[in-house]
Image (cartoon, helix red, strand yellow):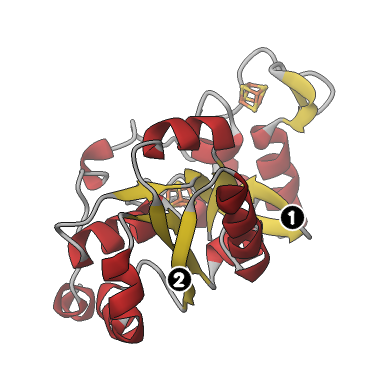
Amino acid sequence: MIITKKRDFKELMGNIKNYKSFFLLGCSECATLCGTGGDPEIKSMKEALEAEGKNVTGSFVAKTGCQVLGTKVELKPFKDAISESDCILVMSCGAGTQTTVELFEDKPVYPTNDSMFLGNMTRMQIFDERCSLCGKCILDKTGGICPITACPKGLLNGPCGGTNDGKCEIGPEIECAWVRIYNRLKRIDKLEDIKNTAEPKDWSAHKKPMSLSAREKKSS
Ligand code: SF4
Ligand code: SF4
């Protein structure tokens, strides 16, 4: 899921100071789980805006804010509330914000959140980055632990000299990725794999902007 955090409200107010009325759009997926764009956050945002003398013409929590066509259909009943607003505030990730920009080309659209990383929710409201979306996965060679993400240096061929008692030199709260990989390979009886040398990472698989069609997925 995409991990988001709320932007500073004062900063948001600075961006939208010239607008009077707003439509609020959340997302029922990642932003809801992050506590940045579900029903409770929409309610709080409405109250905060009204306390600043602003008007909220309507709100909706989209099923999946990054799904352009689905969101377009879901927003049809809100046509009037959206057209009455000066501006749409999107309480999801940057992808959801850009869905909204695409659907309402003539309307100012502002994000209320910062998009941080692709993460796993390990406990309620605790998120860890596990994958950096490199475009060419090497988990098959590393016991299923990603050194590109888990090692602050992204080292591909074993630990640096800073590993200390299983911890990373960056800080004792971080386990050394390569100690984890070693332990994992040992546990699944694949320790021999650690001797394989990884070639320098081919970052050409990580192009921007990325795009993938269903047809391409089937033929690959
Ligand atoms: S190797 Fe690449 S795709 Fe695989 S988990 Fe790591 S960053 Fe993600
Ligand atoms: S101590 Fe381990 S995790 Fe930290 S930078 Fe070195 S190899 Fe990477």
Q: Which mark is residue 134?
A: none
Residue 220: which quarter of the image?
Answer: bottom left
Point out residue 184 in the picture as x, y percentages from the top left corner.
72, 51
Residue at position x 39%, y 40% from top?
Answer: 16
Residue at position x 27%, y 44% from top?
Answer: 206
Q: Is residue 65 above or below residue 44?
A: below
Kind of residue indicated by mark 2: Gly
Q: Is residue 103 above or below residue 45?
A: below
Residue at label 1?
Answer: 125
Q: Is residue 179 above or below residue 125?
A: above
Kind of residue indicated by mark 1: Gln
Q: Is residue 208 visible?
A: yes
Residue at position x 41%, y 47% from top?
Answer: 111
Q: Is residue 40 above or below residue 139?
A: below
Q: Nearer the viewer, residue 152 or 199?
A: 152
Contact between labelled residues 2 and 1, with CB atoms less than 8 Å apart? no
User: Secondary structure under badge 2?
Assistant: strand
Residue at label 2?
Answer: 58
User: Secondary structure under badge 1?
Assistant: loop
Q: Is residue 36 visible?
A: no
Q: Is mark 2 within 8 Å of ligand 1?
A: no
Point out residue 112 in the picture as x, y percentages from the top left corner.
48, 47
Residue 101: which quarter of the image?
Answer: bottom left
Which residue extends farthest front?
53
